[in-house]
Structures are given as structure tokens and as C-alpha cells.
Image (cartoon, coloured by chain):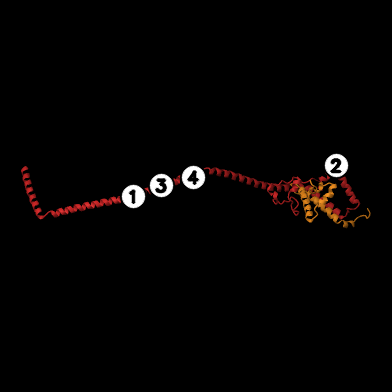
Amino acid sequence: APAALRALPPPPVAVGVLHATRQLHTTQHSLAPLPPLPEKGGEVRHGLIPEEFFQFLYPKTGVTGPYMLGTGLVLYLLSKEIYVINHETVAAACILAVIIYGIKRFGPDVAAFADKLNEEKMAKALAVKNSAIEGFQKAIEEEKKEQWRVEGRSYLFDAKRNNVAMLLEANYRERLMMVYNEVKKRLDYQVALQTLKRQKEQDYMIQWVEKNVVQSITPQQQKESIAKCILDLKALSKGAHASV
Amino acid sequence: GPLSERPLLEVRLGELHTWMSTCDFSPQGLLGAVQKAWNSYYAKYINVRRGGPTGISMLLAGYCLLSYSWNYQHFKRHRWRKYH
């Protein structure tokens, strides 16, 4: 509606005329979506006089009123020579004829071309918008999936905790084993030491006893024992002879 | 609505007097009025999706009339008859 359009910020006067663009997003309204452009402009009759003028005169003078007004005005201007006919009139008539012919002949083609350009622009903008929407929807889905994955956090941490506990247990048992081995080695050493000492004492004592015994055998005792042995042998041989 | 905010076309003839008194005749005010007028014309006849020759043809016709009126004294000398 024109009222809504009047409330919009004004474009600069120097902006080009046909299908020009507006300066968007320069006021506090910039966050709201802009209303779409109107399809057709204000109604104009014969390309020059707005329809509002005809509507304004209709109640009093009917349909032919404005035309009568126009004819009367033209006759008045001509007869009083307020409008003077000179060479420029002829030139203006020729130019007008050419312009009107051109518009009637090429108008629809130019309009179709301009519409096509507009369509392409709109299609591009729509494509961008749609791809952005799709991208965001995909992002939303992936975000939901990530949120679902987060629920499995507890399992992950349980597994990790189990791993760590197992490592600690294995380490503890390793060290326990090491302690046991070390202590056993030390105890074995002590035991071996004692056995060795005992053995050495025994050997030494046996040697000492043998040495003393050998020393205590005097030569005289030796002789006596040899003579006793000979006598015994003789007795034995006698007995053996007898048995054979 | 209040008198000062109504567009000129909706002001009645009897109220024209008071409407003129509410006008702002400083340079900024005049410039603002010109801008508003141009914007409403632009929005109505040019800045549409399927415009036509109407938008500028009215501007050109207005320009023709204006330039004729500016050069009226010159044209007066080329009248065909002296007494009308």
C-alpha cells in the first residue's frame, strides 16, 4: 500500500530512474523482511494522465468530462496563441510519432527481457536462500547426532577407568613379585652363608681330629700293632689251612 | 489525521490556508518536502516490478511544459496574429 511505502526511508534523488535499486538496510527497520515491490504502477491513461484525475471528475461530469476539459483547454491555448505553432511543433509531432510507434512495437519484447533478468536475479537469490536453509538443517541434524553421542560418554569413561585400574593392578603385582624375589635372594644368601660356615667347621674339625690321631700314634705303638696283626694273620691262615 | 501530516492531495480547499501555515518553509523543510514528493512519485510509478514507459514519460511531459513556460516570452514574439 502506498502508505506503507511512504513510511520507508527515502531513496536518494540522484538514483537512476528505471528499475533502480533502493538502499537497503540503512535504518532501524533493516532487520525486518522488506515488503515485495508492487506488481504494477499507478494507472495512467494515454501514458500521460493519471487515472485519479478521471476518477476525480467522474461524479460531476461523467466519462467524457476530462476529454471535454482537455479539448477545451487545447482550443483555448491555440486560439489565444498561448501555445504558438512553430517549427518545434512539427518536430515534436514527428518525434512523438516515432516514439509511440517504437513503444507499441518493441514494448512487449523489452518487457519480457527485463522480466527474464529479474527472474534470474530472483532465482539466484532464492537458490542462495534455499542452500543456506538446507545447510542449516543439516547442521541441526548433525548437532542432534552429536548430542546423542554425548550420552555414551559414561561408557567411554567406564572403559577408560577399567583400563587404568588394570594397569595399576598389574604394576602393583609386578612390584610385589620384585619385592618377594629380592627378599628371597637375601634370605638364600644368609642360608648359604651359614651352610658354608658349618661345612667348613666340620671339615676343619675332622681334619684336626685325624691329624691329632695320626700324631698320637707313637712308633712303639705302631710296632706293637704290626706284631699283633702278624700274629692274627698267622692264626687266621692256620685256621684257613685247616678248613681247606 | 492531523492537518500537517496529510498529503497535499487530501487537503480540502477550505483548509488550504491553515495547511500552508503548518508548512515548514526553511531550506531543510523545502528540501524535505521535495524529497517526500519525489519518493511518493518514485514509489508509485517507477519502483514497480512491471513498469512501463509511464514513469518517465510523465516526467518528460512535465519537463516539456516547464521549459515551454520558461521560454514563453521568446515564443510570444513568434505569434502568427497580433490580436486574439
Q: Residue at x 65, y 46 (%)?
A: A129
Q: Which residue is disc 4 drawn over?
A: A157
For disc 2, the chain is: A
What's the CA distance linking mark 4 and mark 2? 88 Å
A148 vs A12: above or below: above
Which residue is the site of mark 2?
A59
Q: Nearer the viewer, mark 4 or mark 1?
A: 1
> Same chain, marks 3 and 1?
yes
Chain coloured red in this rendering = A
Of residue A72 and residue A141, the one placed in the foreground of this image is A141
Q: Both on one chain, marks 4 and 2?
A: yes
Residue drawn at x 10%, y 55% is A219
Chain B: its colour in the image is orange
Q: Which residue is mark 3?
A: A170
Mark 4 vs mark 1, CA separation in Å: 39 Å
Chain of the residue under label 4: A
Please name the amino acid that badge 4 sits on: Phe
Dot 3 or dot 2, earlier in sequence: 2
N-terminal-most mark, 3 or 4: 4
Camera-near label (3 vs 1) is: 1
Task: Provide the residue designation for mark 1.
Answer: A183
Q: Quadrant of the C terminus of chain A?
A: top left
Q: Nearer the viewer, residue B36 or A91?
A: B36
CB contact under 8 Å: marks 3 and 4: no
Badge 4 or badge 2: first in the primary sequence: 2
Say what secondary structure mark 2 lies in.
Answer: helix
Question: Which SS class for mark 3?
Answer: helix
Indicate the position of residue A134 as horizontal and vertical percent values: 62, 45
